[in-house]
Amino acid sequence: MPAVRHAPASGVSRRSLLFAGLGAPLLASCHAGRTAVADPEESASDEVVLALTGAPTSLDFTRNDGVAIPLVLMGNVYEGLVRIDGSGEVVPLLAEDWTVSDDLRVYTFALRRGVVFSDGTPFDAHSAVFSIERVQSDEWTNGLSAGMDVVASATAEDTHTLRVELSEPSNQWLWSMGTLIGAMMTQGGVADLATTPVGTGPFTVERWSQGRSLRLVANEAYWGDPPASSSVAIQYFGDPPAGTNALQAGEVDAVYDMQSPELTEVLEEDERLVVETGDTSGQILLALNNRAAPFDDVRVRQAVMYAVDRRAVIDTAWGGFGVDTGGAPAPPTDPWFVESSRYPHDPAEARRLLREAGHDELHVTFKVPTRPYAQQISEIVVSQLREVGITAEIRSVEFPALWLDEVFGRHDYQMSVIVHAEARDLPVLFGNPDYYLGFDDEETRELLARADREAPGRQEDLVRAAVERIVDRAASDTLFIFPNIVVRHRELHGLPADRPTDELLLAGVGKQEGPA
């Protein structure tokens, strides 16, 4: 289902909002683009330069949560045994094929031959065993490593045959192997993952400037077809309009995951540019700390669900782009998606629930990460909560480092807002009471656990039941499904707008003459 755009609820054009908000022409200033990544003499003539926001603080996703690192490294530097294709299906990658035992617990993979890591080490069943076991070790502190807990053993039956035995049947495990926990690594290549990742992918990291840029160059030892461009440079812009300025100035070839949706109408009028909107699995989550007062009371959480007008949030904060799920924490791309009608916008019901919970008025702290979408959304949510008697004090928290430490790591918050980009992450978000949301519901955990063990047809029914339970208990409010807005020059081709997992595949991205 494509992400949709609606006219703002107020009837004010987004063009008016654009110039009222910016107060200056789009090209008011120029910012460094290509030269900030590499000297022009060093850049290949076919180099592609992309603008992104949200620079990673490290290149080691085994020890750092968040999507910024895997977005540019997975599928480009690292590869897995399998990949999730554009329709969300598991397809072969470093494993050419696999079989599954009748009890759905033993997977036997036939591995691709002739594959080497970028440091020259051969990829084989032994490196696959190392990679799987390392996710289960203390070396992996990324919370998504829990997806490997179901693995009882991994064995190299021979050089190119891998046997993996699960402790119980799991529908999720093979799918998760197409995400970052399935990244294949070599024992000699993990010494400095923070700056020098080693993988089997079509690119290697040539240069990384923390907080500023990343340059990938073609891996000459790659087992597959060479990438369309010999190098791809990623330029990070903390200020979203600066990225679009660089695009119009010709300093970058595309803005990916654009954080200024209000600019799209103006950009669409530029004949040099193409604006595309793709599907993602990212959820804009209004996170409520279920362990901390006042949100340890389900009635208060339900009051917030009634108080927030999700459609108005989408229209006002994000230019009408995005999909309203009715608060349900599952995107339309998931097979168990059903739009919820449980919480229509109803301020009167919100006030009634607050009174029932013993609150005529509430004062809460709203820790908001320093990301454009979060800043814009928080202002609207605060206004809507104020109408029902909840005063939310916004405290901006630097993202990623401080937010990941305070909110995600130490659970030191009452309310926050963040995009969860990881696909099919319901067990992570709502199946673990120790997670930062603090949602502790035995019935939900049992439904998710049963769904993982059941045959696919039955699995979907069980996950839908779990989603209904999560919504009924108002664990947190999914404000909308985040769209991927891509603006590119017409000669650029192969840049995917849809993103079913947290990876941006760059091997097919290149330039061509004429319309693209």
Image (cartoon, rainbow, N blue to C red):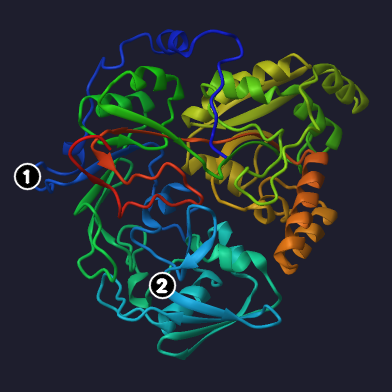
Asked whether 76 or 441 is in front, the reply is 76
Kind of residue at badge 2: Leu
Kindly identify which residue carries mark 1. Answer: 41
Q: Position of residue 157 (x, y in %)?
A: 49, 91
Kindly identify which residue carries mark 2. Answer: 94
Q: Position of residue 299 (x, y in %)?
A: 86, 32
Q: Residue at x 26, y 14 (%)?
A: 28
Kind of residue at badge 1: Glu
Q: Residue at x 78, y 17 (%)?
A: 388
Q: Secondary structure at mark 2?
A: loop
Query: In the orientation shown, which residue stands out farthest toward the bottom?
Result: 158
Task: Estimate how packed mark 2 is, as few (under 14), some (14 to 19) or many (20 or more) residues with alpha carbons within 10 Å.
Answer: many
Decide: is 259 above or below 380. Answer: below
| Residue 423 left/right relative to 61 | right
Query: In the orientation shown, which residue stands out farthest toward the left?
Result: 41
The residues tagged by marks 1 and 2 sit, at their Cα atoms, a distance apart of 36 Å
Q: Position of residue 346 (x, y in %)?
A: 80, 20
| Residue 439 left/right relative to 178 | right
Q: Secondary structure at mark 1?
A: loop
Which of the 4 quarters of the picture holds residue 513?
A: top left
Residue 96: numbered disc: none
Which of the 4 quarters of the picture holds residue 254?
A: top left
Decide: is 234 above or below 302. Answer: below
